[in-house]
Image: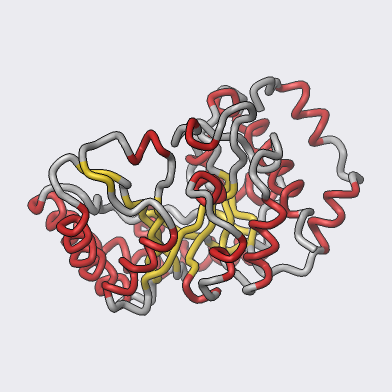
Amino acid sequence: MSDLNRRRFLELSSLPGASFLLRAATAPRKMKMCLVCGAIGVKATQLEAIDLAHRYGFEAVEPQANYLASLADSELQRLLQDLKNKHLEFGASPIPADLRSSDEEFQAAVKRLPAFAKALQRAGVTRTTKFVAPSDDTLAYSDNFKRHAMRVREVASILEDHGLRFGLEYVATKDALEKERYPFIHNMKGMRELIAETGKANVGLVLDSFFWYTAKETDGDLLAPTNKEIVSVDLDDAPAGLPVDQQRDQRRELPAATGVIDLATFLNCLNKIGFDGPVRAEPFNEALRKLPKEDAVAATSQAMKKAFALIR
């Protein structure tokens, strides 16, 4: 990905007969290739995102709660019919609440959650997400664990009332873990412990191939949860030439770009447990972000189809 340029991606995108595209289209899987424009540096309205997802072969698209809330019933029904006609579905939406903010800020966000949840429910969305920071300047692990369990439980209760699942993502890079004074959850084991502590059945995991790699986890870790425990998945590769402990949180590559991360194992394990949710690319890649909108989406589609072709 470091030598991205417009011509190269246009050339790649002009190869619809490539064997890996054919395999990606026919692989026996339930997970959906989801376009999240913001995750690849593309600014797009809900309607633009739906159009881009359709034209570049995605199977799902991120819902934009504020826009969905603004639609009259008839307008929403037309949008949902358009999604259906384009063989698309909505993926997951990040919640507008910071789990580590001050009590006042968190409670203010909680008060806004019912309207957010209602807008998603009305559009048939069932999945929401949030990341959990792996370190904190003021709270040691046990106190931070208690605060997160309490806050996640409160958020999950509101989302549950609107038929929404809530996925939590751990961050596993060493730089993020050491960023603040006290380390916190930074692997799947710790996140599953937090989820169990909440006691909420609608809380689950967001799995990211980059963090699975930097946490030095294995196929056994991926096979431990059930499909019902996984809400959403992020799919990325890692920059080549860096030891795992020197990988940095927001420097990644498109799926299958370098081969550093064993995406065959990652995706096949998820497929084995029957994961049926959205999978997005979140590469945090400057070269990709500098591409024109359509080229960035085309490159992301091509990369994800290449990765999905690894599913057997």
Image-quadrant location for residue 297: top right
Q: Is residue 102 left or right of residue 302?
A: left
Q: Is residue 159 left or right of residue 121?
A: left
Please tell me whether residue 270 is drawn above or below residue 307 in the rendered image: below
Picture coordinates of residue 215, whole percent (x, y): 48, 49
Picture coordinates of residue 96, whole percent (x, y): 29, 52
Image-quadrant location for residue 175: top left
Q: Nearer the viewer, residue 104 or 86?
A: 104
Picture coordinates of residue 210, whole percent (x, y): 54, 45
Residue 82 visible to an observer of this rendering: no
Please tell me whether residue 151 is drawn above or below residue 210 in the rendered image: below
Residue lying at 29% horizontally and 34% vertically, measured from the top left: 179
Image quadrant for the C terminus?
bottom right
Q: Looking at the image, which residue sits at the far left? A: 104
Image-quadrant location for residue 136: top left
Residue 109 visible to an observer of this rendering: yes
Please tell me whether residue 303 is drawn above or below residue 310 in the rendered image: above
Tell how many labels.
Answer: 0
Residue lying at 36% horizontally and 61% vertically, measured from the top left: 190
Please tell me whether residue 281 is drawn above or below residue 162 in the rendered image: above
Q: Is residue 295 left or right of residue 47?
A: right
Residue lying at 23% horizontally and 66% vertically, measured from the top left: 149
Picture coordinates of residue 75, whole percent (x, y): 47, 62
Image quadrant for the N terminus?
top right
Q: How is the image coloured?
A: secondary structure
